Amino acid sequence: MHFLKKLRSPSRSKSAGNESISSAFSCSNSSHSSPAHSDRSIDTTRQIPRHILSKIFSYICPHALDESYKSAEESMTEDGCMLCDMRDLAHCALVCKRWHSLAQTLLYQHVRIDAVHYCELEIELSSKRKRRSFVDRTGKSIDAPQMRLLLFMRTVRDSSQFANMVFSVRLPYMTRESSKSELARTISVLPHLRYVDLPAGFFSDDVSSYTLKQELMANCPEIRRMTYAHGSEGSFSRIPGSGLWKSLEVLELSDLQIEESTLRLVLSSFPILQSLKLDNLQAVRDSVFMPTQSLPPFPAVKKLIICKMPQLTANGLATHLSIRQNRDALTNLVLVQTGVLAESLHLLLSQASQLTSLTLEAVVERLFPVQDVPLLASKSVKTLHYEIATATSSYGMQPVSGSYYKYLLASLTSNSLPALRQLYVLDAHFADSLLYSPPPRFGAQAAGYGITQSLSLYTKGIDELEWNLTEFEPISPPSQTSPLSQLSPSSANRASATRPVSFHAAQLSTRWGGDARESVVVGNGFGGFLAVPVNEGRPKSTEGCSYKRSSKYDMWR
């Protein structure tokens, strides 16, 4: 033992000496610099105002500020994973008390439940869900979005503070179809709810959705979007006098068998209605727009969508727009397979002074009328969907829709649409027709001829699924001293005609890249231009502009 004690003592003294040296070294360094722990104890985020810190959190989870009335499928982000964003925001709420209150408000304002992760993490998680721990007692795999809905339901039912924060709830299609009772129990405690994804049977008064509809009508007075489909005529006709959903902004009516008087009475029950869609209401005609003393007037809305109603014509809409309140409110008009013909479209444009977006979809069987028809003229329209298709055509014959695009071409080159910035046509060769249109004669006769604004032209054929984008620059007549003035008149006219833009995608705005097929236009040395397609993969369609009747004309802002 005495021998072991002697062996330990030198090491102990050596370690003690090392500790004294290290302590002396640390003390000498501390005299030249401040302690490290003092910098870590300062929270610099306290100097950031709360509204700026909340704005920073919103970039972590962008869908937390989605105030639109779109469904879960329509409001998906293209370049992110919503579940991962929500997880990161939840982690921010655990940092400190100040972050907790701000992040918690963002988490519960607009709740979104997704079925899967839209990132690489889903590969790992899907393999874990196949394990026995993700199987219930009956041997059935646990439905992840349904479990998330149950957890959310438990949270809002246990805390009125969280329930009062919720403005919208978005769910996958299968979850809202299979969890109607859980969804009913959830919305029964959400008094400030403005939008919720609902099952399809809810809109047609299906028996399986009866409890859900009663809970929504009784406990959610702030609902802003609603749809009534075939089968819900009874509940629709009982709206007048019920005081139901006074804050409704968006209304869609589809395949209803109702009278015009019932329609006008119900529409008058929504004082702040902004968007209205009428789809296949066979009993509604032009008389619905006629002012009468016994019925309330047709409402003045910002967006009006009319689909599959050939009994509604341009004369009826012109009567509606003859009232100043109506024409000042209307900014977006969509006409799909209606009685409004292309040759009568000028009547609406002449009265809708505040119209910024116009859509006309029609299938024609005869040529454009030969008699003089006024050109399309509007100082406010910025976006025009002019999609005319031919019903049937014999083999070898030119489609009759070509005459309708000649009418549109004449309207464009006459400069009667000076505010137009985006144009969509169902003619694959319309860009060439616009580029090689008859050149103007410079001088007094050429005043007002040609396109004088930048124009984004989207074209495609009937058998194509994607839009082809061509950018046009405004016309610039040559001066007397320019080299073009020394050319022949025909060469000068061709060289100064409206020219499409030719740039690399990275040098243009974000809307060029990825939204549509990019067209590169280069000169051919003779005053004309040669279009060269981009050799990168198949492009995507423009958002909200695919040629599907069911998805293109969604009316939710």
Image: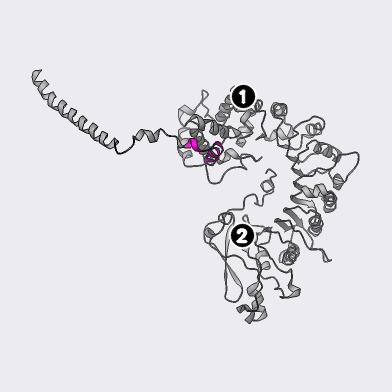
Task: Name the quadrant containing residue 365.
Answer: bottom right
Q: Residues within 10 Å of mark 2 (few under 14, many from 20)?
A: many
Q: Are marks 2 and 1 in contact (CB under 8 Å)?
A: no
Residue found at the far right of this picture = 293
What residue sits 63% from the left and 74% below the top?
Answer: 495
What residue sits 71% from the left and 59% below the top?
Answer: 419
The numbered mark, 2 or 1, whose residue comes first in the sequence reads 1
Q: Is residue 432 above or below residue 2?
A: below
Nearer to me, 343 or 509: 509
Between label 2 and label 1, give the one nearer the viewer: 1
Q: Which mark is residue 469?
A: 2
Q: Which mark is residue 160?
A: 1
Q: Which residues are magenta?
A: 45-61
Q: Position of residue 399 (x, y in %)?
A: 73, 63
Q: Position of residue 85 (x, y in %)?
A: 52, 38
Q: CA–CA distance between discs 2 and 1?
A: 51 Å
Image quarter in which the C terminus is found: top right
Q: Position of residue 166 (x, y in %)?
A: 62, 31
Nearer to me, 272 or 339: 272
Coloration mode:
one colour
Is there any visible trace of residue 548 in the rendered image? yes
SS at circle 2: strand
